[in-house]
Amino acid sequence: MHEGPRALTDFEQFWSRMADLWHGLDDGKSGIWDTSLIVYQFILDIARSVSTQERADLSETSRISVTSNQRESDPGSEAFTRAVALIHAHYQDDLLLKHVAEAVGYSVQHLNRLFHQRQGVTGHQYMQRLRLQKASEWLDKHPRASVREAAEMVGMEVNYFIRMFKREFGETPGKGIRQRNQFSAEKGEPDVTTTL
């Protein structure tokens, strides 16, 4: 494993990303999504550079010949991994699949094909399921929370959230809240009324 400073193989690309970030922040015109996208791309560029250098170091030290097919990773797999990481990092934001597709350099249709091949659902369905799962976990940790709070926590409109929650879990989030409150009351905790 390489320790210490590393030489950048594509310094101009890194400098360009940093300049984009500086200009966006200085102008005050970049929104949170634009700034986040630039930072995310910058991190991916660094990771690719480090990964490339580590592969070169490993090849040099072990002197193992690797065919070009083994050396190159599947670009679809890399894009899918980046898309999933981006969705998990921004599921609470106003994130659309087209934003994710742009960030990984694919069309929405092609990204949907990757999600369908690997997860059996579209990218939108994957995002929706993640949001609902996170909301369910959040409600379990916050038994006195309202349905509105849970919906807002995952960036969904309340009525849509209730409909999709019921479709995914077979019951409305309000019913789950009532059951948790009833369980708390049976344990002797004070009764809490929740509202939308």
Image (cartoon, helix red, strand yellow):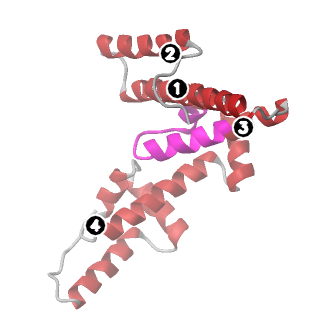
Q: Which residue is mark 1?
A: 46
Indicate the quadrant containing the N terminus: top left, top right, bottom left or bottom right: top right
Image coordinates for residue 7, horizontal then vertical, percent: 53, 17
**Contact (Cβ within 8 Å) of mark 1 with mark 2:** yes
**Contact (Cβ within 8 Å) of mark 2 with mark 4:** no
Q: Nearer the viewer, mark 2 or mark 3?
A: 2
Type of secondary structure dominating the magenta stretch: helix
Number of callouts:
4
- Residue type (three-letter) at the residue carrying disc 3: Gly
Q: Which residue is mark 3?
A: 76
Q: Residues within 10 Å of mark 4 (few under 14, many from 20)?
A: few
Spatial CA distance of label 4 from label 3 is 38 Å
Q: Considering depth in this image, is 37 or 93 the residue closer to the camera?
A: 37
Image coordinates for residue 56, horizontal then vertical, percent: 67, 27
Residue 37 lies left or right of residue 72; in this view the side is left
Q: Considering depth in this image, is 162 or 9 the residue closer to the camera?
A: 9
Image coordinates for residue 28, horizontal then vertical, percent: 30, 15
Does the magenta portion include 118?
no
Image coordinates for residue 175, horizontal then vertical, percent: 37, 76
- Residue type (three-letter) at the residue carrying disc 4: His
| N-terminal label among 2 and 3 | 2
- Residue type (three-letter) at the residue carrying disc 2: Phe
Q: Residues within 10 Å of mark 2 (few under 14, many from 20)?
A: some
Q: Relative to 91, say whether 162 is above or below.
A: below
Spatial CA distance of label 3 from label 1 is 19 Å
Q: Which residue is mark 2?
A: 14
| N-terminal label among 2 and 4 | 2
Rendering quarter of residue 137: bottom left
Magenta-colored span:
78-101
Q: Which residue is mark 4?
A: 142
